[in-house]
Amino acid sequence: MEDHGIRHGAAAPSPLVDEGWGGGSEGGGTRAPHTSPPAPSPQGAGEKSAAALLSWFDRHRRALAWRAAPGEVADPYRVWLSEIMLQQTTVTAVTPYYRRFLARFPSVTELAKADIEDVLKLWAGLGYYARARNLHACAKAVAARGAFPDREEELLELPGIGPYTAAAVAAIAFDRKASPVDGNVERVVARLFAIEQELPDAKPMIRKLAAQMVPARRPGDFAQAMMDLGATVCTPKAPTCGQCPFAGSCAACLRGDAETFPRKKKKPEGRLRRGAAFVAIRADGHVLVRRRAATGLLGGMTEVPTTTWIADFDVARALADAPQFAPARGASKRETSRKVSPEVSWQRIPGVVTHVFTHFPLELIVLRAHLPKSAAAPDGMRWLARQDIAEAALPSVMRKVLAHALR
Ligand code: SF4
């Protein structure tokens, strides 16, 4: 049989592998590959562990802006919105965005009716802008069908909903027996079973084990309890096993090296890309901006003009990509024929702006120029009033560039 890399240490806990939690018949998941099989477990021990976690959750659940209070029925719109926003970012970062979004679009119907530009503006700063577009497309699809579907398979058919979000919405909003596995849950499961296999290869195994843990009773609360446990107790660097309802049955805790799980393959870092950003400032304070292509990185967002971002960026050639202004009114014929305003003088601002995208780090030098109030924006660009910058759909990297140039 395939070696799935799970190791039950000498004190490997049996309650995690009984019928309730997947000692099951499918094999691979809970077998010890290099050691003797785990000892038979008492019937129902998995349910007991699930009950212990739920009881912990009832006492320690986090109060989150999007979470229904105990006894309240969850709102699928809020659950879905929060889960999309939370992908790749933290509760602290998302909460203000979520509140603003909900205030502006209190229902999926309101969001479906919104202009995509308004959605992008409210999203600006959260990153991963394709998600904002998918969010809008999904809202339209849900509004067209009348309501969110309550089963994972149907949720998966909606734009921007992948297996994780489908499981999260099905479990949390509809109390379906589904198992959303985010980074927190992944860590908890990897530790509970002391999984030696490295991430990302271990993901299918972890998902399988996580699914086997879901109890028939209160699956939605169980999903949230796993997330909360990972966020507050089973934390990456310093798990507080003494406060954990799984302490007596957690393989990694019993081994004494919980913080070393999950095992991870070292990620090769994306190669540094570099480029130049051009901040043109008109005499009335307006700043020159353009819109990025609708698809791809930061799709559809607003930016100041830049060179392309490449590893072998040549600073000496940066000005070749500077915006080309039409000659000012009253310019000579010669200037007009050159189609370049001779008075534009780009000045390098000391320092660089750095930003880290998922796949690569970026370093931008910033060049600034001052233009007369009569300067016309080049084709495909526009002047953005200083007071409108805060509301514009500018991604974080562009806010950094403007902060650097306008300080
Ligand atoms: Fe995490 Fe410790 Fe709980 Fe195991 S016992 S799940 S390592 S906090």
Image (cartoon, grey):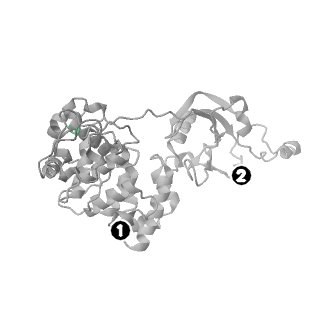
Q: Relative to 216, does residue 60 appear above or below in the rendering?
A: above
Image x and y of residue 401, in percent: 56, 37
Give the quadrant of the N terminus: top left
63 left or right, relative to 140: left
Number of other residues with Cα within 10 Å of mark 2, as a class: few under 14, some 14 to 19, many 20 or more: few
Q: Relative to 57, does residue 32 appear above or below in the rendering?
A: above
35 left or right, relative to 342: left
Instruction: Give the residue at mark 1.
Output: 149
Instruction: Give the residue at mark 2.
Output: 379
Number of other residues with Cα within 10 Å of mark 1, as a class: few under 14, some 14 to 19, many 20 or more: some
Name the amino acid type tagged 2: Asp
Image x and y of residue 18, in percent: 18, 49
Gap in angstroms between the C-alphas marked 2 and 1: 45 Å
Question: The residue tagged with tag 1: helix, strand or loop?
Answer: loop
Image x and y of residue 373, in percent: 68, 45
| Ligand 1 lies in quarter | top left
Question: The residue tagged with tag 2: helix, strand or loop?
Answer: loop
272 left or right, relative to 333: left
Which one is closest to the eye, mark 2 or mark 1? 1
Q: Please name the residue shown 71% across and 46% down the image.
A: 375
Name the amino acid type tagged 1: Pro
Residue lying furthest top:
350
Q: Relative to 367, does residue 40 appear above or below in the rendering?
A: below
Image x and y of residue 366, in percent: 61, 33
Give the quadrant of the C terminus: top right
